[in-house]
Image: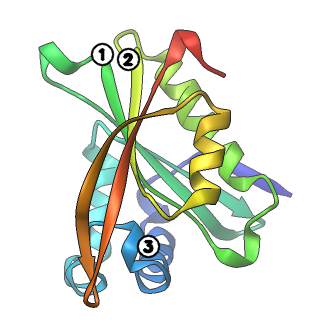
Amino acid sequence: MMNVERLEEWDAAAYFQLRLQALQMHPEAFATSLDEEAKHGVEKFKKRFQESKAWTYGAFDGERLCGVITLFPQQLKKVQHRAEITAFFVHPSMRRHGIGRRLLEAVWEAAEDDAYIEQLNLYVTAQNHAAISLYEEFGFSVTGREVEALFVDGVYYDELRMTAKLEESL
């Protein structure tokens, strides 16, 4: 049975392992490199889950963490109507089972419950057509393109900025 829930400090080790797998399998999809993330260790995520204003959700297949997503509400007064979706990953063995959709629904509901958030933003590698299609189903549209945003193993990757207004989408 698939369960989606907000991660707590005791989930940090499983999150860290899945995060390293994501960075190894898809380095073009994340700004952080595997080496950079590995240096931080589990403690970074324990602290984030305890103290952060960010909300990280995980999809569990039984006890196994197989997908994650983070929502970072903006804290500054002029931009507190926005939140950023980051660190979205579903393990390849679990894709095409609706897990990505359930994770997006979890952060969407969290954003709707926040009195300030009106708009969700995210960045996606322009070549990630499956993710782009999912985001479009949720009402996201492309609001910008950063050419050569990431440089991984000698290859440049463009990123798309996508935005959804909560009251106009889903």
Mark 2, Cα crowd under 10 Å, few <14 / some 14-19 / many 20+, is some
Location of the N terminus by quadrant is bottom right
Q: CA distance from mark 3 to mark 2?
A: 26 Å
Q: Quick one: label 3 or label 2, which is nearer the N terminus?
A: 3
Q: Which residue is mark 3?
A: 19
User: How far across and down, in percent of the image, does residue 34 sit?
Assistant: 31, 83
Vertical arrangement, residue 36 with respect to residue 157, above or below = below
Numbered label attached to residue 31: none
What's the residue type where badge 1 is placed?
Answer: His
Mark 1, Cα crowd under 10 Å, few <14 / some 14-19 / many 20+, is some
Residue at the image point whose x is 66% and y is 56% from the top: 59
Mark 2–mark 1 CB contact (< 8 Å): yes
Q: Quadrant of residue 72?
A: top left
The reply to whether residue 52 is visible in this rendering is: yes
What's the residue type where badge 2 is placed?
Answer: Ile
Of residues 46 and 22, the one nearer the viewer is: 22
- Find numbered disc 3 in the image and state the secondary structure of the residue it sits on: helix
Of residues 59 and 92, the one nearer the viewer is: 92
User: How far across and down, in percent of the image, does residue 152 sit?
Assistant: 28, 82
Location of the C terminus by quadrant is top right
- Find numbered disc 1 in the image and state the secondary structure of the residue it sits on: loop
Q: Which residue is mark 2?
A: 117
Q: CA distance from mark 3 to mark 1?
A: 28 Å
Q: CA distance from mark 2 to mark 1?
A: 4 Å
Q: Nearer the viewer, mark 3 or mark 1?
A: 1
Mark 3, Cα crowd under 10 Å, few <14 / some 14-19 / many 20+, is many
Looking at the rendered structure, the number of numbered marks drawn on it comes to 3
Mark 3–mark 1 CB contact (< 8 Å): no
User: How far across and down, in percent of the image, does residue 80 sit?
Assistant: 24, 18
